[in-house]
Image: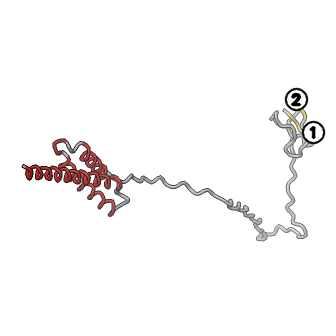
């Protein structure tokens, strides 16, 4: 326990070194059980206004002046509130992806038993439908490059197939003319 030698206030906190009232250095103090605790006398504020006589007459009461708390100024910069987490689904690209897969299958595996004759038209139709959907609602549908790849590879299958049929027919005609 510590005590202020100036105002005789006692402090129980051992970490204090100075009086919180007047700033005087505190001294170690152990109260004796016979001695009453020190009393602190606080002078009451003066209630008599300067220059005006005070009369306690009935009805002469004036309420004290209310002081407003000063408003704290707004900070110069405030961070913006975080944006709400909105769910934005990725665009649908199922038709475009299917068109691309069928187009690639047509041009690679489609030569076996003319399997591409079935997959290539389906790929072209699905790619065209996908491009129309993307054009009408680009926020909902996506995958334009995939649809284009599907249409191009399926068209290439038909072009190569047409070239093969023409070359085969031309060679067949040439054989028939020579014999």
Q: Position of residue 112 (x, y in %)?
A: 19, 41
Q: Kindly identify which residue carries mark 1.
A: 5
Drawn side of residue 15 relative to residue 128, left or right: right
Looking at the rendered image, the disc whose residue lies closer to the viewer, 1 or 2, is 1
> How far from the left and from the top, in percent, is residue 82?
54, 54
Numbered label tally: 2
Q: Do the residues labelled 1 and 2 touch (CB within 8 Å)?
A: no
- The residue labelled by disc 2 is 32
User: To which quarter of the image does residue 67 belong?
Assistant: bottom right
Position of 166 with respect to 70 (left or right) is left
Q: Split into 4 quadrants, where in the image is the N terminus?
A: top right
The residue depicted at 21 percent of the width and 48 percent of the height is 119
Q: Position of residue 63 (x, y in %)?
A: 75, 66
Dot 1 or dot 2: first in sequence order is 1
State the image quarter where residue 58 is shown.
Answer: bottom right
Q: Is label 1 in a helix, a strand or a loop?
A: loop
Q: In this view, does 127 lie above or below 107?
A: below
The mark found on residue 41 in the picture is none
Q: How far apart are marks 1 and 2 (CA)?
A: 16 Å
**Is 58 or 66 nearer to us in this picture?**
66
Q: Residues within 10 Å of mark 2 (few under 14, many from 20)?
A: few
């Amino acid at each position: 326990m510590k005590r202020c030698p100036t105002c005789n206030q006692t402090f129980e906190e051992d970490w204090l070194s100075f009086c919180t009232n007047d700033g005087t250095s505190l001294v170690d103090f152990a109260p004796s059980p016979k001695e009453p605790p020190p009393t602190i006398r606080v002078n009451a504020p003066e209630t008599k206004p300067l220059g005006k006589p005070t009369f306690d007459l009935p009805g002469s009461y004036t309420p004290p002046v209310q002081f407003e708390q000063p408003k704290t100024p707004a900070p110069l910069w405030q961070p913006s509130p975080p944006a709400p987490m909105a769910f934005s689904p990725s665009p649908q690209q199922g038709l475009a992806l299917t068109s691309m897969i069928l187009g690639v299958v047509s041009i690679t595996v489609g030569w076996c038993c003319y399997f591409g004759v079935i997959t290539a038209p389906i790929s072209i139709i699905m790619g065209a439908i996908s491009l129309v959907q993307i054009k009408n609602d680009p926020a909902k549908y996506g995958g334009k490059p995939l649809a284009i790849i599907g249409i191009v590879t399926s068209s290439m299958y038909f072009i190569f197939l047409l070239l093969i049929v023409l070359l085969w027919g031309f060679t067949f005609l040439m054989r028939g003319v020579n014999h």
